[in-house]
């Protein structure tokens, strides 16, 4: 029943933004130099899966989900990623930005939530 220290949420906010920035830079570099590889894509998706699993765990903790729901949230977080992959396989395009909101904006919003939890507590 003991709360996590606030530095954990600060670390989560920093890690979220750090990973997001480096993921964007890596993707732009690979497209610009046309040096993407299947192994690089797998590593990128593995990093995304790890990041979103961490996000699901922290968000579940912040909203104080009971253990069953927390486990479900943690286990199903990669379902949208699999859906995006299937969309790419079927349509050949991977446009996941809707209007002005895309993955970068969502990651920034989550980092802000983690930062608020670090400053104000859960």
Image (spheres, rainbow, N blue to C red):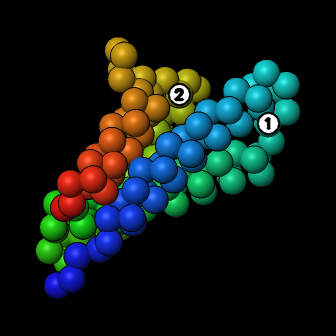
**Image location (x, y in percent) of residue 25:** 68, 32
Q: Earlier in the sequence, mark 2 or mark 1?
A: 1
Residue 106: image quadrant is top left
- From the viewer's perspective, tell me whether residue 116 is left or right of residue 86: left
Q: Nearer the viewer, residue 111 or 43?
A: 111
In the picture of the structure, the residue carrying the numbered disc 1 is: 36
- From the viewer's perspective, tell me whether residue 99 is left or right of residue 12: left
In the picture of the structure, the residue carrying the numbered disc 2 is: 94
Q: Is residue 111 above or below residue 120?
A: above
Q: CA distance from mark 2 to mark 1?
A: 16 Å
Q: Is residue 21 above or below residue 5?
A: above
**Image location (x, y in percent) of residue 98:** 36, 20
Residue 76: image quadrant is bottom left
| Dot 2 and dot 1 residues touching (CB under 8 Å) | no
Q: Of helix, strand and loop, which one carries label 1?
A: loop
Q: Nearer the viewer, residue 20 or 48?
A: 20
Residue found at x 56% / y 45% = 18
Q: Is residue 116 in sight in this rendering?
A: yes
Residue found at x 39% / y 66% = 8
Residue found at x 24% / y 67% = 61
């Amino acid at each position: 029943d003991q709360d996590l220290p606030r530095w954990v949420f600060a670390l989560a906010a920093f890690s979220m933004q750090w990973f997001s920035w480096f993921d964007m830079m890596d993707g732009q570099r690979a497209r610009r130099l046309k040096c993407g590889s299947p192994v690089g894509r797998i590593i990128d998706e593995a990093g995304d899966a790890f990041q979103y699993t961490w996000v699901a765990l922290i968000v579940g903790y912040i909203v104080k989900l009971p253990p069953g729901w927390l486990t479900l949230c943690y286990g199903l977080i990669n379902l949208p990623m699999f859906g995006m992959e299937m969309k790419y396989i079927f349509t050949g395009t991977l446009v996941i930005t809707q209007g002005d909101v895309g993955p970068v904006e969502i990651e920034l919003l989550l980092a802000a939530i983690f930062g608020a939890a670090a400053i104000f507590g859960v």
